[in-house]
């Protein structure tokens, strides 16, 4: 649950961060602004449903900044740590107090396993779950296939996505997150089965070259 309502000043700051993040994520493949906005909205929805207290300003800012470290780089392996540095500098420049800034930066660092620092606070866990939820379903699968498409066969991509999506759902922290993601998770499994069967049928059809003789 949210511990309080946002102030007018906080709403104005969030809108400025939203514009900044929208501009930076505009052409980012697989992690464009629609993903950022989806994660922020999932985070808000989860926070409304859980009993644990969470500060809305800290959580929403963390959700908006969570993938900023992917901008301007070819790999996302350090995007949590890199994004924390970018978010921290931005928040410092607009005079966000140190304690609030630190809590937002922690969300950015800990939303991804690549940082090897698991989420600890409620806000960190909420944004972590929200990011996982946007990997599920048709759109999540399409995003994942776009990101993983380089130098892989279709079969490898599908198997890789299947294993990752199962892991994403199993590791959600809150029952509210699992409830929100159940339909998307089922859709993911159905989609993977459909693609696998289609690939299998295609492979059967192309096992032999039918020469015009």
Image (cartoon, grey):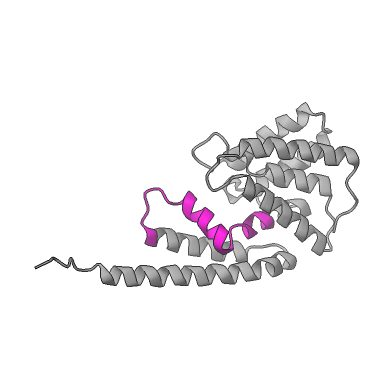
Residue at image x 18%, y 65%? 209
Magenta includes 143? yes
Which residues fall within the magenta stretch?
Answer: 128-155
On-image quarter of the N terminus: bottom right
Quadrant of the rendered structure where residue 172 is?
A: bottom right
Image location (x, y in percent) of residue 75: 50, 40
Above or below for 172 versus 120:
below
Q: Is residue 199 visible?
A: yes
Above or below for 3 versus 182:
above
On-image quarter of the C terminus: bottom left
Image location (x, y in percent) of residue 124: 73, 51
Most distant residue in the left direction: 213
Residue at image x 54%, y 67%? 188
Position of 205 compared to 84: left or right?
left
Above or below for 138 versus 186:
above
Q: Mostly what secondary structure, the magenta segment?
A: helix
Q: Nearer the viewer, residue 147 or 205?
A: 205
Position of 189 compared to 123: left or right?
left
Residue at image x 28%, y 72%? 204
């Amino acid at each position: 649950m949210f511990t309080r309502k946002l102030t007018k000043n906080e709403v104005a700051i969030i809108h400025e961060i939203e514009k900044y993040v929208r501009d930076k994520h505009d052409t980012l493949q697989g992690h464009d602004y629609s993903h950022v906005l989806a994660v922020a909205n999932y985070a808000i929805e989860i926070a409304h449903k859980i009993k644990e207290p969470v500060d809305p300003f800290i959580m929403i800012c963390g959700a908006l900044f969570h993938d900023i470290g992917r901008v301007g780089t070819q790999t996302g392996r350090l995007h949590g740590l890199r994004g924390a540095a970018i978010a921290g500098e931005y928040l410092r420049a607009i005079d966000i107090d140190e304690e609030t800034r630190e809590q937002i930066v922690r969300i950015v660092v800990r939303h991804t396993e690549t940082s090897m620092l698991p989420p600890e606070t409620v806000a960190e866990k909420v944004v972590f779950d929200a990011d996982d939820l946007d990997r599920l379903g048709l759109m999540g699968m399409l995003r994942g296939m776009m990101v993983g498409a380089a130098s892989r066969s279709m079969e490898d991509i599908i198997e890789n996505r299947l294993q990752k999506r199962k892991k994403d759902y199993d590791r959600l922290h809150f029952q509210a997150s699992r409830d929100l993601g159940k339909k998307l998770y089922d859709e993911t499994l159905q989609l993977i089965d459909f693609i696998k069967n289609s690939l299998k049928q295609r492979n059967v059809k192309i096992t032999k070259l039918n020469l015009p003789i």
